Each structure stands twice: as structure tokens, then as C-alpha cells.
Image (cartoon, rainbow, N blue to C red):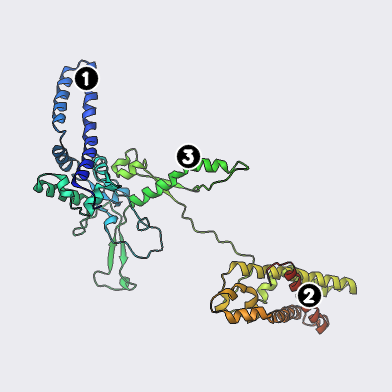
Amino acid sequence: MNNISCQDIRKGMTHSLATMYSSDYANELLNLEKAISSNDSAAIKQINIKIQELSKHFEFETWIENFITQKLEGVAVVTHSAKGIHSAIRNCNINYNLQAKPDNYQFVSSATPNILPFDCTNNAARVGSVYAFLNQIVKDDITVSQLIIDNHPEILRALSDDNEMANHYLQCLEKAIFDDFQKPNASQLNKQIFWPNSDGSYLSHSEHNYRLLIPLHPNSLCYLVYEKIQRRYSQENKKARELRKTKDVEHQSYFSFKDLAILKLGGTKPLNVSKLVQSQNGKNYLLPSMPPKFTKSRYPSISISQKTIFNNALQYFCRFGFRLLFDMVVEPKNVVEERNNRKEAISIILTLLLKFARHIQITLPAGWSRDYSLPMSQKLWLDPNRAELEGEESFKLQYEFGKWLVELELDFASWIQNALKEKFKNANKHFSDAEYREWRREFCAVVKASKRNKEGIF
């Protein structure tokens, strides 16, 4: 920015002002042609006088004076405006670009973008000219407004050769850009929220327990959102979307937005709200903000205080296998059929148990078991990635040693036996040590088969 000279700034301003006032000159020439074609001598005479007056203004000093005294008056440079809430509200704006932003924030807001474009509001007849002037690029993408905000040393000389006039012009420009919070003003049309200063504010009868909040429309942030969403209509995005339907070509990523709503501001004259709102044709996109739809997992959860995974919740998850096992006890068949039914029931229970274990292993983060009350054998099984974390050397040694697999066999066999005893309190003959050992062998066989197939569960 230091390499920008007074001539660079003056050149940029001249270009903007010439565009601004030459359009008036061109309009009068067009009106003159229409008057001549209709032989309206009175109109011809009046338009010629206007053209002569305009031709006298083709000097920078005249242009800048007209701009400051005519165009700039009543225009505010803002990022937030109450006109987005009600178009009849005036002089209730904020330029957030000039405010200190929070160091840490967790939500998307006007503090999120690195560069927040400014907007112009209040006087619909003049905001376009002021917006174009302040957005005029001087050099290296640096605009006139940025030079004014940074108080560039050459800005005064660029505004006028007369130092007194230059100071006056700069004060007028700063008044439009900078906010005056010494005398905050709100309209009766503003929405207002009383916010308590503390938890006990509503119980206290002393004064100053609440602060008055006035919501403003985030013009600049809404414009950035609008621009982002409009890019879905770009040629690159359209081409990428079409390519997704074509085979044997390299597919490119593209973006789309679903469930959008549109809030129209300004009616048929969005410029009455602000310049950026006019650029959006009054459209403000609203992203869906419905509450999330939570779906209950079909897998049982594990609480921090839980002492084992082999409980009633896991039994319900494996209920189809247990139902078959219980039916076999209620209506025993011949020895061969009974043995096959028992094997099938245990096989179903083990299949579901392994699905549950795999679900826990892949959905919970490594190290989740540190604060849980499960026995170490179950932590080693369900949280295997914890062994790779820093400071978990002891956990890794226990995992590699493998003794925890034997403890799992005992837990599984005890779980089956206790379920049967709870269901059939007077049928202990079906729950002897032989069955208990068989359930252990079934679990051990499943572990070996899973390792052999490299399923990653053990």
C-alpha cells in the first residue's frame, strides 16, 4: 500500500466520477435527440442549457465537490442495517469491518469471513454512486474505501489541491464510513430484545439489570451466502454435474443446495433497502434450520458406569438366538436334534455379538474406554486402537499377551448360563458344567475363525 501515490488515487477517483457524471451527460444527449425528433423547441432549449451546465463540470474539483455535497449526503456505509428488517427505518446501522472481532467463535457469523464486503444504504437515489466510488480499485486490488479507513498519507492530496477542502471532503467520507456509537439511535420500527445481565437479573428490582439488544440484518454476510449459492449455476458446476452421468470420464466434484427458502426484501424496489440487496434482486437465501432427525441405533449403548457388556441390553440385541435357545429347553427333541438346535442358537448369538463388537470398534474413537468401568478384557477387545495411542504401552502389552481372550470366553459362557437360569429357575439339568464348557469352546472357535478370515474383530 505504501507504493500508492497521490496520482494513483486521483486517477482512480477520476475514473469513477467520470463514469458517474458522464452517464448524466449521455442521458441528456439522448433526451435532446428525442426532443429534436418531436420538434419540441421548449424542451430542446431546456436540455441544451443542462448540457452546457454539465459540460462545465468535466473537471475533477467540480466532480468531487458535487459528489461530496450531493451524492454522499445521507448515505451510510454498513455491513448490518435495520432496513433489512423494515425498509422505513433509517440511521440504525453498523459497519462491522471497523469493530474488533472475537478471537474464538464456534458459530458461523459475520466474524467468519476474512473479508466482509461493505454495503450502502439509507438513500436509494445515491447509494449506487457512493458504492461505486468507494469500491473503485486504485492499485493492486486496493480500493478507495480501504485507503480512507487506513488513513493513507496521500488520500488528502488526492481529494483536493486545496488542503482545507481536502480535510472537509475526508471528514464527510469518514462520517459515511465510520459508525458513531456515542449517540445510538433506534426507531420505533426496530425489533428490540431485553437481555438480562445476569442469572438473577429478573429477580432484582434495581435498575440496569437488562441491556437492550436491537437485531440488525447482516447485509454483507447474506450477500456472501447468496454469491456462494449462485455459483451452482456456473458453467464449471453445470459441466461437473453433467459429467456425473457419463461413463468412462474423469468425474469432477460439484456442489448443490437442497431445501432452500427465499426471503424477498424491498419488494419491487430492493434498492430501497441497500445496494447489495439490489445486487441480489432482493433475494436472501435461507438454509434449512430444522432440528436434526435422530435415529436410534439398533446396537445397545455402553454407559461409563457399566460393569460389563454382557447384560440384558445385549441379550435383547441377541434375542433371536436366545429365543431359539429357550425354545429348545421348553420342548427338548432327540439328542441329535437338540444338539443341532443348541449349536444353531449359540451361532446366532455369537454372530450378533461380533456385529456389536465391530460396531463399537469402528464407531467410537480410540481411547474411549479409559474412563469406562468395563473389565480390562472387554476394554482390550472393544477398544483395540487404544494400544496405538501415546502412553498406552501397558495396554498394548496386555493386548498382545492375549490372556484377555480367555476371560472373554468365561464372561460369554457365564452370560449364557445366567440367562438360562433366570429364564428357567427349575431346569438346572440343562445348565451343567458340560454345557458351560461347550459354550466356551463355541466362543473360542469363533475367535479362531475370525482371526483366520482376518475380520479384524479380535
Residue 235 is tagged as 3
Q: CA distance from mark 2 to mark 3?
A: 61 Å
Q: Earlier in the sequence, mark 1 or mark 3?
A: 1
Q: Are dots 1 and 2 in contact, CB under 8 Å?
A: no
Q: Earlier in the sequence, mark 1 or mark 2?
A: 1
Front-lying residue, 340 or 89: 340
Q: Tell me if residue 103 comes above or below residue 133 in the rendering.
A: below
Q: Tell me if residue 269 comes above or below residue 196 in the rendering.
A: above
Front-lying residue, 386 or 429: 386
Q: Secondary structure at mark 2?
A: helix
Task: State left or right for residue 6 relative to residue 137.
Answer: left
Estimate the x, y position of residue 94 in percent, counting from the top left: 27, 54
Mark nearer the viewer, 1 or 3: 3
Residue 35 is tagged as 1
Front-lying residue, 424 or 176: 176
Residue depicted at 49% across the width and 58% down the height: 291
Q: Quadrant of residue 215?
A: bottom left
Task: State left or right for residue 241 relative to residue 210.
Answer: right
Mark 1 belongs to which amino acid?
Answer: Ala
Residue bearing mark 2: 442
Q: CA distance from mark 1 to mark 2?
A: 103 Å
